Image (tube, grey):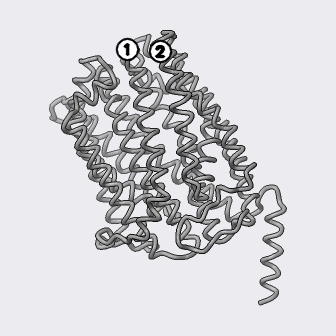
Amino acid sequence: MDEKENERTKNNMKTKTAFFTRDRDFYRRYILLTLTIAAQNVITQGVNLADSVMLGAYSEVALSGVALVNQIQFLLQMLVIGAGEGIVVLAARSWGRGEVAPIRRISAVGMMIGMAMTTVMWAIVFIAPHGVLRLLTPEEHVIAQGVIYLRIVCFTYFFFAVTQILLASMRSVETARIGLVVSVTALFVNIFFNYILIFGKLGMPALGVRGAAIATFISRVIETGIVLVYVLFVDRKVRLKIRDFFSIDRSVLRDFYRVSLPVIGSGGMWGIAQTAQTAILGHLGQTAIAANSIAATVFAIFSVACYGSANATAVLVGKLVGEGKAPVIRPYIRSLQAMFCVIGVSSGALLFFGKNLVLTFYSSLTPETYTLSKAFLTVLAITLVGTSYQVACTTGIIRGGGDTKFVLILDAVFMWLIVIPLAALAAFFFRLDPVIVFVCLKCDQILKCAVAFIRVNCCNYRWIKKIDRGTEVESA
């Protein structure tokens, strides 16, 4: 027994003194989890790209209308994903300690909060779709197309929430493949029904925007069905049952509120900020709306490794802390940061050199929209390097370590004191070119890198927090 203890002590000392970790299993799990989540994200974004390309071929006005609705959807996604990240931060600790029962209680609380937020969002857009879209643009013909889409697609919000909360529960225990299966299925279902319903194929009428909304609804229902079957009947780690979601543990609820409210607040604020950004560009005309929609969709495809890395990092850092490895965590954190930089440079280069090829799929764009889209994508290719580092540091390392308030404060300061005011001045006071406005909207992705680096490396690792009723963690 003493020999084993001595060997463990020697290994810990080697890990603590090494600059980068030599833990091969850690690298293997990081790469596998990142690639799996990235693959899931690329397929998920492929659904949005299919919508964008098909609607772009059908009508640029339809594309612009759906782009506005997707900004509302983005706000919902950020809120629900915030609840999901709250699950990951808490449940990964329990998974690291080998405790499964708390994960079921954490998932139940996350589901309750996620569904509550979804219900509020659905009620707002269902009751006042015109009013909501009019906040984003004065273009009535664009609003008309958006309303048609929104009246149907708002009913998918509930299915989306259930799917994302359950996938977050699975991701917290390092089960990510089911998300990939779900996304692949949704992609093919969405493309098939988009094709026959938008353009009127196989004997169906050409429904345009309405057809795209119906296709999205069908794919969301199928997504949820697959996830429910897996979670309730196939999964052998958490073993969730339907009855688990009807029993709320108040102590877990308090922990969840403390951890997840800053995450949900950050996500909600980010969603509102993105909607405000769309509104700023929306008031610059239909061309800017369409170009921003295309740029955002293409960027989402090329940034999947960046966000996959951040999600994987949150799980693994939480697990390391739960396993009691906080005192020897520094080499792991240095290794992660090096990989963030590699991913950022690679992804940015791919976007920069691949943007022309991607834009050829948008056959009905006007020359002005094509040129503006290309300029927006060039800006995003540069900022993607910063995004890859700072997002993974803040939402992966810092949030995974339990410091969820820092990300909320960081986003609030940069978004509302720098980005939005700067872009609004550029657009409405100085009336600068849309490309300059777009640069103002994305500048925080580079500026945040310095703050993220200092917080992760120069503050004695104070981002490692005790967040639940598990064992205390030592300072790194």
Q: Quadrant of residue 111?
A: bottom left
Which residue is painted at 35% across and 29% down in the image? 67
Let me know if residue 199 appears in the view. Answer: no
| Numbered label attached to residue 122 | none
Q: Is there CB contact under 8 Å for labels 1 and 2? A: no
**Closer to the camera in the image, 109 or 206:** 109
**Closer to the camera in the image, 371 or 247:** 247
135 shown above or below 193: above
Q: The disc labelled 2 sits on which kind of residue?
A: Ala
Residue 180 rendering spot, x and y as whole percentages: 45, 53
Label 2 Cα crowd, 10 Å radius (few <14 / some 14-19 / many 20+): many
Which residue is painted at 42% across and 58% down in the image? 167
262 left or right of 150 in image: right
462 left or right of 283 in image: right
Determine whether the residue tagged by mark 2 lies in a helix, strand or loop. helix
**In the rendered structure, which disc, 1 or 2, sits on the residue that comes first in sequence?**
1
Q: Nearer the viewer, mark 1 or mark 2?
A: 2
Quarter of the picture containing the C terminus is: bottom right
Residue 72 rendering spot, x and y as whole percentages: 34, 36
| Numbered label attached to residue 285 | 1
Which residue is painted at 48% across and 16% down in the image? 372
Q: The disc labelled 1 sits on which kind of residue?
A: Gly
Residue 187 rendering spot, x and y as whole percentages: 37, 44
Determine whether the residue tagged by mark 1 lies in a helix, strand or loop. loop
Residue 401 rendering spot, x and y as whole percentages: 61, 58
Q: Which residue is mark 2?
A: 427
**Closer to the camera in the image, 24 or 263:** 263
| CA distance separating discs 1 and 2 | 11 Å
310 shown above or below 2: above
Q: Quadrant of residue 45?
A: top left
